[in-house]
Each structure stands twice: as structure tokens, then as C-alpha cells.
Image (cartoon, rainbow, N blue to C red):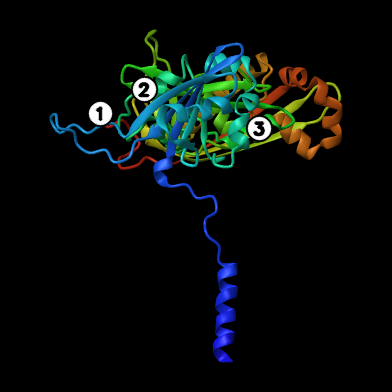
Amino acid sequence: MKWLQQLIMLWLATMIITGCWNRAELPEKAFVLGAAIDQIKSDKIKLAVQIYKPGQKAGAQGGKQAEPYVNIETKSESVFDAVRDITLHLGRKAQWSHIRVIIIDDETAGKTPLLSLLDEFYRDHETRMSTKVVISKGNASKYLEIKPLIEQTVTHQMKRMQEIGLRESGKVPAVSLLQLAQALKSQVPDIILPYAIERKEGVILPGAAMIKDGKMIGTLTGNQTENILMLTNQFKHGALRLPCERSDNNKKPKVEAVETHNTRTKITPVLNPDKLKVNVKVLIIGNISELKCSRLDKREDEIHFQQRLKEEMEKQLMETIRFTQERQIDVIGLGNTLYRNHTKVWKEWKETWRERYADADFEIEVTADITHTLTTVGKPVSAK
């Protein structure tokens, strides 16, 4: 009787344990590392993908190592159909779970709503929502051909440039598919995306593309991007440039530098019926990174240096805000803040928000706290 019970238990176990009903062997998959989208006609797009090429070994000629990837281009009226056509080139099904970055050329980004263009990537269960999105100057597919400087692929390099660039220099945003969708489906669908440019030495991300109502309308310089990131509490570490006080001659002033290790920004709208007023308070904590003309021998000198930094940053931040006001693009998220905290007012202002933002009065107050002069005293090393 005991053996019968064991047999029944074994039979029940075989019913519970299932196999892989939809398995796909590795040789059947093509792992996509990056994608580039160009709109070549009003009704046709070109999709370029960078696919991992496994099993590369040193070649016979001079021991050179073959590239660990291959680039494929397909064309179609839809992104999904272009994706399926990859099999016609490789004999493998594209696997999207390892994609690093999606590049879109600036002309396409200026004509086609980004969420509509990227619809297939949001629907596909394989694509990770952490995949980064980049706008390129000129043809996007050519960026996949650029040789990386240090990483194995340019797509991985561009992903790292965003992540480390945001963390260490504060001059480039890092935006994922998820963050892009959240921004463009919010009350004010404006955001900035990394802007890639090809140079002789390779690809760089010198600034950001401004996205308004889902389409690109222009670009920001590195300094302007830095200011936007500071206003949106994304800027943490970086170098702030402080021009020396002008002397009697007309030469261009030298520039000193402050290394920041913490910044905090608080934006408070003041709701007046006639005109919107916005108070912006910014705290900058940092160290002296480079001195060329200042001496901090006394406490008064330190206070004067901090005052100069305060005034310079207030000037830069105000110039950047006015730049966005002229274009009626709310990339600092003020409208969304108003929607969350003052919903009733937002319902009245939503239809005319862009005009209200452009006409708003901003008051910026920066507090600068210099905590250290690093490994030397508070004067230029060259000074005697």
C-alpha cells in the first residue's frame, strides 16, 4: 500500500512540474544593443540596429580583434515591421532585453511625436523601460558606425556618457523610456533629452534637445543644460565657472572654478490672480577647485568670493529661465508642480499655461557655501 501512495505522489509531481513551452535556443536570438530611427519619407522610417556578435576571437592579421557587433538596417512604414525584417538579414529573431540606447535624429524628432514614434518599444515586453533615449544631430544610423573610445560598443558608451555625465559633470540629462513617457503624458509635456553630435574624435553629448508637446523645438548648450538640471534638482556634482573680477584692461577675464558636491533647489509659485510670481531658492555647497585671481586670506575674502559666486549663478539661472520663457517651454516642471499642489488653480490656468509661464516673474536667491580649499591654501598656487 505504501508503494501505491509513493506512485500517486510521483504522478502528481509530474503534473505540477512543467517544461519550457515557449523556449527559444540562443542561436535563434539576435541580441540588440542599440537602435537608431530616421524618417526617410513622410510614410517610411529607417531602423538601424546594433546586434551583439558572439564568439569573436583575435584575427589572423596582426592579432586584430574583430568587432563584437554587426549593424543592420531595415526600412518600412512601421517600426514593428522594420523590426521583423531583421530576420531577413540574420536568420535570427531580434531580442530586445539588452538594448542600451535608442537614437532618434533631430529632423524626425522635430516632425513626429516621440511617443508615437516609440510606440512599439513601449508595447514590446522585452524592451526595458530603463533604455536611454538620445536625439542626434543629423542621421541617427551613422552614430552606430562610430568606433567607441573605451567601451566595446558605441551604444554602451553613449549610455555610460549619460549616466556618468549627469552624476559627475551635470551637463547632460539621462532620460529613460519610462521617464520620457511620464514626462510627455504629464500635464505639461515638456522635457530635455541628451543631444549627440559627431566629432572627429567620436560622439559627444554637449548639451540637450528641448522637447515641447512631444516634439523637438531646439537645443540647449552645456551651460544651459547644467542650469536646467540644477533647477530641477538633478544636478549634484560638477564644476561651476566663476569669471575673475575685471581689471582696468579690456582683456577677457580668467575663469576660476568651484567643485560642487551638493545642490538643492526649491521652487515656490506665488498665486496672484493677474500674474504668476515664482520664488526660486538654490543652495550650492562646494570646494575651491581652481583659483587664478582670488585670494582667500581672510574671512572677508571668503565672504566676498561666495557673494561673487552667488551673483554669477543667479545671473546664469535667470538667463536660462528667460530663454525658456521666450520659447514658452516649461522644462523646469513648474506647471506639473502647480497641478499637484494647487489642482483647482491649475484647472483654471491649464489652457493658458504657456502664456502665463512666459509672462511669470521669477525671483532667484542663491546661497553659496564654500567649505574647503582642498589640498592647498586659499590663493593661486602660482602666487608668492
Q: Is residue 137 visible?
A: yes
Chain-order first, disc 1 or disc 3: 3
Residue occupied by mark 3: 183
Query: Split into 4 quadrants, where in the image is the N terminus?
Result: bottom right
Name which residue type carries label 3.
Ala
Contact check, label 1 and label 3, Cβ < 8 Å: no
Which secondary structure lies at badge 1?
loop
Query: Split into 4 quadrants, where in the image is the C terminus?
Result: top left
* Residue at x 18% of width, y 33% of height: 59
Chain-order first, disc 1 or disc 2: 2
Please indicate whether residue 368 sits to the left or right of residue 255 in the image. right
50 or 355, which is in the foreground?
50
Q: Which mark is residue 108?
A: none
Residue occupied by mark 2: 145
| 374, above or below 224, in the image | below
Q: Quadrant of residue 9?
A: bottom right
Q: Which mark is residue 382?
A: 1
Specify few, some or many for label 1: CA neighbours under 10 Å numbering under 14, 14-19, or 20 or more. Answer: few
Closest to the camera, between mark 3 and mark 2, is 2
Name which residue type carries label 1.
Ser
Please indicate whether residue 345 sits to the left or right of residue 135 in the image. right
The image shows residue 81 at horizontal and vertical percentages of 57, 26
Closest to the camera, between mark 1 and mark 3, is 3
79 or 243, which is in the foreground?
79
Closest to the camera, between mark 1 and mark 2, is 2
The image shows residue 60 at horizontal and vertical percentages of 14, 32
The image shows residue 129 at horizontal and vertical percentages of 57, 40
Q: Quadrant of residue 177?
A: top right
Which secondary structure lies at badge 3?
helix
